[in-house]
Image (cartoon, rainbow, N blue to C red):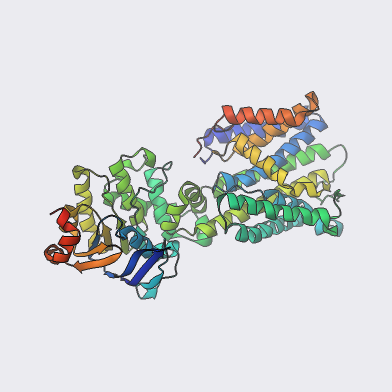
Amino acid sequence: MMRAEGLTRRFGGLLAVRDVSLDLRVGVLHAVIGPNGAGKSTLVNLLSGELRPTEGSIHLNGADVTDWPNWRRARAGIGRTFQRTNVMPAMTVLENTRLGAQAQGASGLGLLSAGRTTTEAAARAALDRVGLSRAAATVAGNLSHGEQRQLEIAMALAGQPTVLLLDEPLAGMGAEESAPIAALLRVLAGDHAVLLIEHDMDVVFAVADVLTVMVDGRVLEAGTPAEIRASAAVRDAYLGHEA
Amino acid sequence: MTLTGARGNLMLALGALAVASMPLWATPYHMQLASTALIAAMFALSLQVLVGGVGLVSLAHAGFYGLGAYSVYLLGLPKLGLSVAVTLPAAILLSGGAALAIGALALRTKGFFFLMATLAFGQMLFFLFHDTPLGGGADGVFIQRPPIGITLSRGNRPTVLLLVNLGTLTAMYAALWWLMRTLFGRALLGIKANEHRMAAMGHDVQGLKLAAFTVAGALAGVAGHMAALTDAFVSPELLGWHRSAEALLMVLLGGIGALHGPILGAFALTLVQEAGQMLTERQRLVEGGVILAAVLLLRHGLAGGRGR
């Protein structure tokens, strides 16, 4: 589905990501964990096309998308959310989500034909899925923090992607808010290839099928949750602080 | 930018009726003044596509306005007996084409650098007409009006031109009202609100901005064409950057938060200029004071719509 090989990204003298390879497949929830500054968000930006890799390649469904800008990758089926809520605050929840659906729906002169019913149906379906339908008419800036995080996911889902890159979807959420979202992540993995970045280890180990542990921009270890839990290297470098 | 609602459109319709009834009660001089305001409104409305529509501030806009005006002279179509049915599409093509070419280059930059790039391109157009024989000289040139289907005489000219300009502005407003409701218009508003997120969701932000820049330039060409038709005179001053700045002032005064804001702004500024001229020789000072007061007191402009 989506494959990254030997991704390296240099910022001046800093190697933010070095030689990272990973595979994303529909039905698999792939979590990336690691301490702050390990390069997790940079990795998401490389996969989504916000940043170009210094070295390495990215393939989506067999096509080399390494040089594609972010909007073209999004059209090819890569949806993403942001660590910091990144929405159109003055627009309603439905309008925010509809703009996510619209990017896939039409281009060129097709943008002039009405076509709003189809994009609106896709938007409402996405809102349903994240449980935000009742707030469809609310102005996004007036949502609670937790609801804004749900909107982030809905905007990505509205484009009907096959790959979902979720950058800390639970950031800043209390336990009560995060439980239904964690359950949603599991459901989404059923029909998407999901990459999840998350700091809450309880959630990560509960929902992930595959784990990649990053430290200093490198992959320290990759495997199933059980394998990672048993890894001495991971315990020393990272989990040891918490377990 | 909010899209003007039913109440706003009703008010605009009443205003249009008042202007349309001017031949019954106003002097020819005041009808000419109203024509000037209508053309300024077209120009400012075309700029609103960029400012309120997609969040771009351009100083090249008068260049496209002037090209629309000069197209009547350059192509010499009235001399060939060709009417507005030919000169207006020609103006749209010339201004839109220039906007497409300039936009493709200027839109590689952002923010302050975009402003400076549009200033540079706009001034290049200005000097092309000011300093070369192409435009008939630095002092401007009288042109033959393209036929509009009604024979103009000294007696009926102010009335006919007033109604033609009112009809053109109405058509332009209706077209933009429709355009901003299409998926294209919604995408522009999304870019204005959050360009980065729009790209991340798969919108071709550069392509959409260029399309908006081209549409705005083509509509500025319509305004310029109507100015040439009304005044039967064109001069390089039409392309100068201060004319772009004046249109930006009209947009700001009327309100960047509503589609119809620039129409109010254009009428208000034309009236202030006229009143300033009647009362004092320091009309620019009056103008500046009124604008300053309006910007400080009316945060969302005369239209009062919610800003971003």
B265 left or right of B30 in image: left
A130 left or right of B278 in image: left
Which residue is drawn at the image coordinates 28% and 62% (left, top)? A195
Residue furthest out toward the front = A13
Q: Nearer the viewer, residue A74 or A103?
A: A74
Where residue A178 appears, as percent x and y from the top left, is 22, 47
Which residue is drawn at the image coordinates 38% and 40% (left, top)? A141
Where residue B260 appears, as percent x and y from the top left, is 59, 38
Q: Is residue A224 above or below residue B61?
A: below
Where residue B41 appears, as percent x and y from the top left, is 67, 40
Kindly tell me whether residue A117 is visible in this rendering.
Answer: no
Residue A4: quarter of image: bottom left
Query: The C terminus of chain A appears in which quarter of the rendering?
Result: bottom left
Kindly tell me whether residue A237 is visible in this rendering.
Answer: yes
Where residue A54 appears, as percent x and y from the top left, is 41, 69
Residue furthest out toward the bottom = A62
A3 left or right of B300 in image: left
Q: Is residue B21 above or below residue B169?
A: above
A186 left or right of A153 in image: left
Which residue is drawn at the image coordinates 86% and 53% (left, top)? B137
